[in-house]
Image (tube, rainbow, N blue to C red):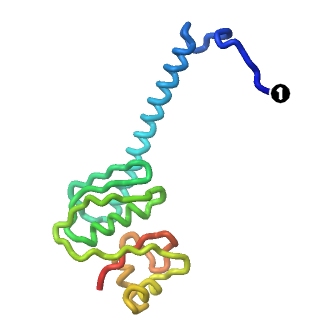
Amino acid sequence: MGVFSFLKNAGAKIFGRDNDEAAVKAAAAESAAKDARQAEMLERQRGVLLRSVVDSTGIPIENLDLNVDKDAVTIYGQVMEQQHKEKLILALGNVTGIATVDDRVTVVNPEPEADFYEVKSGDSLSKIAKKFYGNAMAYPEIFEANKPMLKDVDKIYPGQMLRIPKK
């Protein structure tokens, strides 16, 4: 077998127009517009799902707005405490498919910012507590600082980002 050549202007007129080239261009443009609409709808759906992630935290945020662009999300709004802002960033960033969170959230009562830590293979909350606080038994502070994202002290995974409050 190989490449077969045909006469371009001969054959069945399935595109419904005398000018097949114009029909192909019109179909391509329509397809591109449909693809753009589908991409826009997918981004809106991702925005709705990410909003449900924010809602599931139970963190009060005023004037919440999320903008999703492929693997990036921008969050706008206002919270009362720094820890709420940090938890929202982590809740969004720890979603599969999200690579960046652009934080535009304002804090009414600013406090010192916590550190963020990426969990490594073999980590536990006690190992992380030992690293940051010098005391492995301080792991409950890290656990509490990451609720409601963490539901069990033994359920962390490599690549997960955690909030480590300053002491």
Relative image position of residue 10 (x, y in whole percent): 67, 9
Callout 1 crowding tier (Cα within 10 Å): few <14, some 14–19, many ≥20: few
| Residue located at (28% from left, 72% from top) | 83
Residue 24, compared with residue 107, is above or below; it is above
Of residues 45 and 98, the one drawn nearer to the viewer in this rendering: 98
- Classify residue 28 as left or right of residue 41: right
Q: Residue furthest left?
A: 108
Of residues 136 and 48, the one drawn nearer to the viewer in this rendering: 136
Q: Mark 1 points at which residue?
A: 1
Of residues 35 and 3, the one drawn nearer to the viewer in this rendering: 3
Q: Locate the C terminus by quadrant.
A: bottom left
Q: Locate the N terminus by quadrant.
A: top right
Relative image position of residue 127 (x, y in whole percent): 47, 86
- Classify residue 17 as left or right of residue 50: right
Number of numbered discs present? 1
Q: Quadrant of residue 126?
A: bottom left
Classify mark 1: helix, strand or loop: loop
Relative image position of residue 166 (x, y in whole percent): 30, 82
| Residue located at (66% from left, 10% from top) | 12
Q: Which amino acid does label 1 sit on?
A: Met
Q: Residue furthest right?
A: 1
